[in-house]
């Protein structure tokens, strides 16, 4: 049961599969989003940000034809044969003379190809005696040469707006002379934990209390997705207190709530959101952990009501809310880091749900081993995991060696 778009009213929202729920998030956020404001930052600040402008090559790349091997610049038509070495050229230099028939120039990797030469023979493939080099093999014109403009032509667009900048992107920006770049502003994401049982991380909890770990992990996940996390005070299980903090959270670009979305007597988050005009797109997904997951919009802002158990919070953010943060940050599309690998041992499950089970992927990525865990409150098991096995809802058994999906952590 979920609250509808009119304040306080109740309507039925269909329970969705994992794939349907993710498609819903992507469609709703993509449809409603507007391009964030742009700001200029230095290259040292740009990593992980989303590009807000096209980036073009400022010249041909490479600017001249150059050698990709240490060896000798030659004319392919002269080979095989014995050639006169007329000099050498290193990276950062040019060779003034033209290579004539029967001549060669010793050349280093990255050095410009001398005029007249059309290929480079590797030093390992020749014998040298004094000023003569013997090449016993043939070459094709252009062999071991990176031609001028083969990587990019002047004014060619190399990066498009909406791309997240990684280390390779930073190298490209530097190579085309961009010491500053325009990027989209990060979305501001409010994090609100709910529940009377929650105390601050620095406090010593009583036996029936838990420390507020969910917002700390969410803050890391939000920042990794390109957002700016803002932790709000804990909302106690009282209507007025929860409503006041939810209203604060809806002033941000996105609101993430942790807890209070199940069917319990004191799970009041959905009622608060409904009374604030919330529109609910789904409030249950056929996954484990994380079935009681709420996604909607209120006062023009999207919100997620994430289940309160740590694994449920962590997993539902990664597979749903992370996409919303990335899209609101200006990213063209949100990708889910799912790969296929082989199971290290047999696996059995009850059918009906897509399960995300903590696991360890081997160092070479060739196998994944599910971790023994005690359910969605088992934080030590989550910390040991570097991935999640993703099961198919209609399949009951897997054998060791079977291929299975894995969500990288």
Image: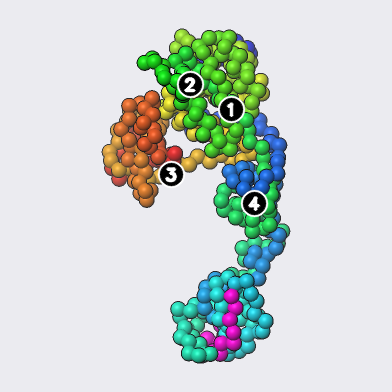
Residue denoted by label 3: 339
| Crowd tier of the residue under label 2, counting other residues whose Cα lies within 10 Å: few below 14, some 14–19, many 20 or above | few
Q: Earlier in the sequence, mark 1 or mark 2?
A: 2
Q: How far from the left and from the top, in percent, is residue 145?
A: 57, 73
**Placement of 80 over or under 350, stated as above or below:** below
**Between 87 and 409, the one nearer to me in the picture:** 87
Q: Earlier in the sequence, mark 2 or mark 4?
A: 4
User: Which residue: 55% across, 9% down?
Assistant: 239
* Mark carried by residue 159: 4
Q: Where is residue 90 shown, x and y percent of the image?
A: 59, 75
Magenta-span inclusion, residue 26: no
Mark 1 or 4, nearer chain start: 4
Q: Is residue 334 left or right of residue 346?
A: right
| Mark in front: 1 vs 4 | 1
Quarter holding the C terminus? Answer: top left
Region of the chain picked out in magenta, as a range: 75-90
- Element marked by disc 2: loop
Per the model, the C-alpha gap separating discs 2 and 4 is 44 Å
- Which residue matches tag 1? 230
Question: In which quadrant of the rendered view does residue 62 lie?
Answer: bottom right
């Amino acid at each position: 049961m979920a609250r509808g778009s009119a304040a306080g009213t109740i309507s039925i929202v269909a329970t969705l599969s994992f794939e349907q729920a993710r498609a819903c998030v992507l469609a709703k956020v993509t449809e409603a989003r507007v391009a964030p404001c742009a700001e200029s930052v230095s290259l040292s600040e740009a990593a992980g940000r989303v590009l807000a402008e096209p980036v073009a090559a400022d010249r041909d790349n490479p600017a001249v034809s150059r050698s990709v091997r240490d060896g000798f610049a030659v004319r392919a038509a002269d080979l095989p044969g014995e050639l006169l070495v007329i000099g050498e050229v290193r990276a950062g230099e040019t060779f003034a003379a033209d290579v004539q028939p029967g001549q060669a120039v010793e050349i280093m990797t990255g050095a410009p190809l001398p005029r007249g030469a059309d290929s480079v023979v590797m030093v390992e493939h020749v014998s040298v005696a004094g000023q003569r080099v013997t090449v016993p093999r043939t070459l094709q014109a252009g062999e071991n040469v990176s031609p001028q403009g083969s990587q990019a032509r002047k004014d060619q667009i190399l990066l498009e707006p909406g791309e997240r900048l990684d280390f390779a992107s930073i190298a490209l920006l530097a190579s085309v002379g961009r010491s500053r770049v325009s990027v989209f502003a990060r979305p501001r994401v409010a994090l609100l934990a709910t529940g009377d049982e929650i105390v601050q991380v620095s406090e010593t909890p009583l036996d029936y209390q838990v420390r507020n770990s969910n917002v700390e992990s969410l803050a890391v996940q939000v920042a990794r997705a390109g957002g700016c996390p803002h932790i709000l005070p804990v909302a106690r299980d009282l209507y007025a207190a929860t409503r006041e903090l939810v209203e604060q959270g809806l002033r941000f670009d996105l609101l993430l709530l942790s807890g209070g979305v199940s069917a319990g007597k004191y799970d009041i988050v959905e009622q608060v959101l409904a009374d604030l005009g919330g529109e609910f797109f789904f409030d249950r997904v056929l996954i484990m952990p994380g079935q009681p997951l709420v996604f909607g919009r209120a006062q023009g802002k999207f919100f997620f009501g994430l289940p309160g158990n740590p694994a449920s919070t962590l997993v539902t953010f990664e597979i749903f809310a992370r996409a919303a943060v990335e899209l609101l940050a200006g990213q063209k599309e949100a990708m889910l880091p799912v790969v296929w690998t082989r199971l290290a041992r047999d696996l059995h499950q009850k059918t009906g749900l897509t399960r995300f089970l903590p696991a360890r992927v081997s160092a070479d990525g060739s196998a994944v081993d599910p971790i023994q865990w005690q359910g969605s409150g088992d934080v030590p098991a989550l910390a040991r995991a570097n991935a999640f096995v993703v099961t198919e809802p209609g399949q009951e058994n897997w054998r060791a060696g079977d291929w299975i999906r894995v969500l990288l952590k």
